[in-house]
Image (spheres, helix red, strand yellow):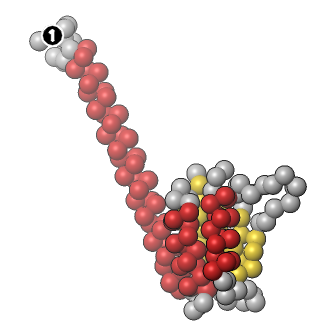
Amino acid sequence: MVGKTTNDGLSAQERAAVKQRAQELKLQAKREKEAGKAAAEKADQLAKIAEMPDGDRQTAERLSEIVADAAPALAPRLYYGQPGWAKDGKVVVFFRSGQMDKDRYSTLGFSSRAALDDEHGLWPTAFALQDPTEKAWNAVTALIRRAAEA
């Protein structure tokens, strides 16, 4: 055996390797827990979207796809009982179903954490969504991509 051994029969090098492995296992367990939480939040969000009335359900599904493609760093979650997407646990983008809220339009919103500030001191925080065109979806994609940059 190389190096001095301790009362437990391990050398300093072996003891360091055991500590390293313990840290690796702890980190792995933390990642698995976080992955499980993220999967549960995504499942909760998908279930809420599935409950939405026609029209809003398709809009929320499209938003979900856009966020996944344009801002993969944003994690799905529920925000006041409706779909939201968060960064570092804080919601950045959210959707409100107009039909569920008994309103005439649905809303795409951005929290104060969204990186939408501009040089004029005026930027969007919410948009009405009512049968968006492809041009509107392209604008939504650009806004979501920009919002997630913070």
Tell me if residue 51 can be seen. Answer: yes
* Quarter of the image that includes the N terminus: top left
Comparing 37 with 132, the one in front is 132
List x then y, in percent, for residue 97: 66, 82
List x then y, in percent, for residue 25: 31, 40
In the image, 98: left or right of 29? right
Q: Residue at x 70, y 81 (%)?
A: 129
Q: Residue furthest front?
A: 135
In the image, 112: left or right of 5? right
Residue that mark 1 sits on: 2
Kind of residue indicated by mark 1: Val
Comparing 48 with 15, the one in front is 48
List x then y, in percent, for residue 49: 54, 80
Bin the neighbour count of mark 1 within 10 Å (Cα to Cα): few under 14, some 14-19, many 20 and up. few
Q: Secondary structure at mark 1?
A: loop
List x then y, in percent, for residue 87: 59, 55
Choose top left, top right, bottom left or bottom right for residue 106. bottom right
